[in-house]
Structures are given as structure tokens and as C-alpha cells.
Image (tube, grey):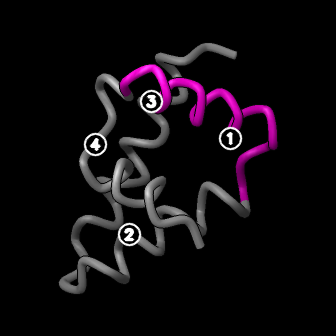
């Protein structure tokens, strides 16, 4: 799994939800999207990237991963 591609995808999701006025709702939207539409190995690769420091991830993605749905 290409980590750079996963980071870009997750960041695009965050950019979409970032427009929501309610930060908690935006964070939940990111977490739900990743949970519903990403394959388990994609989620595992993203979690491994986060464990390695999460470099390049949008702050909203970091929040969503810290507070999963």
C-alpha cells in the first residue's frame, strides 16, 4: 500500500469535511468515511503511518484517528 497516496486521500477527505462549522461533526465525518469506505488493509496502513509519526496528515485526520467512531 502506497502510504503517500493514502495520506493524500485522507487529507482530501479532511479538506471536504473541514468546511463544516461544527468541528466535532467534521471529525466524525472523516472517521466515518474512512471506516465505511476504506478497505481494512488501507486503514491498517494509515494506522501504521500514524504510529510512525503521521507526517503529512491533515490535523483533522489526526483528530479523527484519535477519536474513531
The dot on residue 27 is 2
Looking at the image, residue 28 lies above or below residue 38: below
Name the one closer to the observer, 22 or 63: 63
Give the numbered dot on residue 2.
none
Point out residue 23 in the picture as x, y percentages from the top left corner: 24, 77
Q: Is residue 24 above or below residue 43?
A: below
Q: Nearer the viewer, mark 3 or mark 1?
A: 1
User: Which residue shows up at 38% across the image and 45% down it?
Assistant: 12
Q: Secondary structure at mark 4?
A: loop
Mark 4 touching mark 3, by CB under 8 A? Answer: no
Mark 4 surroundings: few (<14), some (14-19) or many (≥20) residues within 10 A: some
Q: Position of residue 24 (x, y in %)?
A: 32, 80
Check disc 4 and report the residue beneath it.
Answer: 58
Q: Marks 3 and 1, Cα distance to the nearest angstrom?
A: 11 Å
Q: Are marks 4 and 1 in contact (CB under 8 Å)?
A: no
Relative to 49, residue 18 above or below? below
Most foreground residue, 40 or 18: 40
Mark 4 vs 1, N-terminal side: 1
Q: How far across and how far down the image is residue 34, in percent?
A: 61, 55
Provide the residue designation for mark 1: 43
Query: How packed is label 3: few (under 14 Cα within 10 Å), some, or many (20 or more)?
Result: many
Considering every residue shown, the one lying at the far front of the view is 51
Q: Nearer the viewer, residue 6 or 47?
A: 47
First in sequence: mark 2 vs mark 3 = 3
Q: State which region is magenta.
A: 37-53
On screen, residue 16 versus residue 50, left or right, reads left
Quadrant where the N terminus is found in the figure = top right
Rendered image: mark on residue 7? 3
First along the sequence among labels 3 and 1: 3
- Looking at the rendered structure, the secondary structure element under dot 3 is helix
Amino acid at each position: 500500500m502506497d502510504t503517500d497516496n493514502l495520506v493524500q486521500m485522507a487529507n482530501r477527505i479532511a479538506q471536504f469535511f473541514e468546511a463544516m462549522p461544527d468541528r466535532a461533526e467534521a471529525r466524525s465525518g472523516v472517521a466515518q468515511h474512512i471506516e465505511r469506505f476504506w478497505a481494512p488493509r488501507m486503514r491498517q496502513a494509515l494506522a501504521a503511518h500514524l504510529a510512525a509519526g503521521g507526517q503529512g496528515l491533515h490535523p483533522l485526520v489526526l483528530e479523527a484517528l484519535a477519536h474513531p467512531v
